[in-house]
Amino acid sequence: MVIYIVSDGKKGHLSQTRGLAGALLERARKLRPDAAHSVHEVDITHKGFFAKLLYEGKDLADLPRPDLVLCAGHSTHLAALGLARSKGCLCMVCMRPSLPLRLFDLCIMPRHDVPENREPGPKTFCTNGAINCIHPRPDIPKTETLILVGGPSKGFSWDAELLLTQLANIVRHSNTPMVLTTSRRTPPDFLQDLQAACPSIHAVPVEETSADWVPLHLSRASEVWVTQDSVSMVYEALSSGAPVGILEMASATQRGKRRVSRVERGLNMLVKDGLVHTFTEWAKTHSLPTQACVINEAARAADYILERFPRLLP
């Protein structure tokens, strides 16, 4: 099986497509060890609208012909469809696309992206959150508590005092070293306030982290705390196999009315299913329950794709 990933260069989008491509190749190598299997990334970052619309992959002549084109990110859709059409292969998108779903062979999307009161269509495969590249690492000792902090967003407002109060409470009831990192949305004065309120937490600004910093620390985490706005980090934490706690934030309001965002709706599903636990729940016992099961949506999606599209492994 040969897979092309059409990339816009964004880390979150690449995490989804690489995660799915890796799971597909892992299964392909087991099912067809005699065949050649590979993944190739196609960067369309600098292509304009018409170049994407008419893209046929003529610059990829040295690569083997693809069986599948994967994409994530609205700017990749046109190029991925054009490439798949010219190569005569399948095209799948790892998100709810901005183009009509019928244009793709399959849309792999988080279940909270499916409109309420609407059943997924025949070209939709729903996952628990976005697919990612994180896997459990039972071979690595669990020596720390990892804290992932986001910031103000469309769905949630920022209240530093509320967040610091929760962190201080967690510190008082933990004997494990704590490591925290921020996101691009975290207000610049937060780390200064954190140092004053919780000096024992080792904070690493996002600007000082590498691409593998979060995966490395997830592999070491005995438990993970994630702010309520950071939906992608919640699902990566779940994929690591560690117990996951949610640091609560105030919901954003619109014209004085409380608005439930799709992110909050997705988190509410996780809480209802018992996959994550809010700070309020944790405060009753000062412990996070062990995960009943490990989320591995890349593997689940790969199994579905290979069963539904047998032409990928003739």
Image (tube, rainbow, N blue to C red):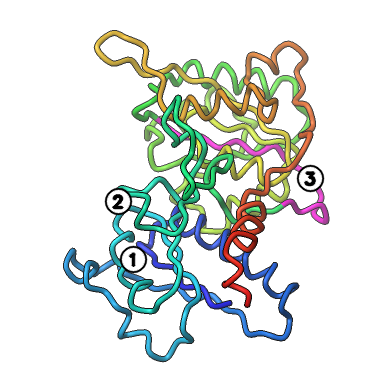
Q: Residues within 10 Å of mark 2 (few under 14, many from 20)?
A: few
Q: Are marks 1 and 2 in contact (CB under 8 Å)?
A: yes
Label 1 element class: helix
**In the rendered image, which residue does mark 2 sit on?**
99
Residue at 71% from the left image edge and 50% from the top image edge: 219
Label 2 element class: loop
Where is 70 relative to 177, above or below? Answer: below
Residue 142: give its label. 3
Q: Residues within 10 Å of mark 3 (few under 14, many from 20)?
A: some
**283 and 259: which one is in front?**
259
Where is 296 relative to 173, above or below? Answer: below
Q: Main secondary structure of the magenta part?
A: loop
> Of label 1 and label 3, which has the lower sequence position?
1
Residue type pointed to by label 3: Lys
Alpha-carbon span between mark 3 and mark 2: 43 Å
Q: Residues within 10 Å of mark 1 (few under 14, many from 20)?
A: many
Closer mark to the observer between disc 1 and disc 3: 1
**Quarter of the picture holding the C terminus:** bottom right
- Quadrant of res 305: bottom right
Residue at 43% from the left image edge and 48% from the top image edge: 95
**In the rendered image, which residue does mark 1 sit on?**
81
Q: Specify start and end residues of the magenta stretch as a single range.
A: 136-151
Residue at 50% from the left image edge and 50% from the top image edge: 108
Left or right of 132 on screen, residue 156: left
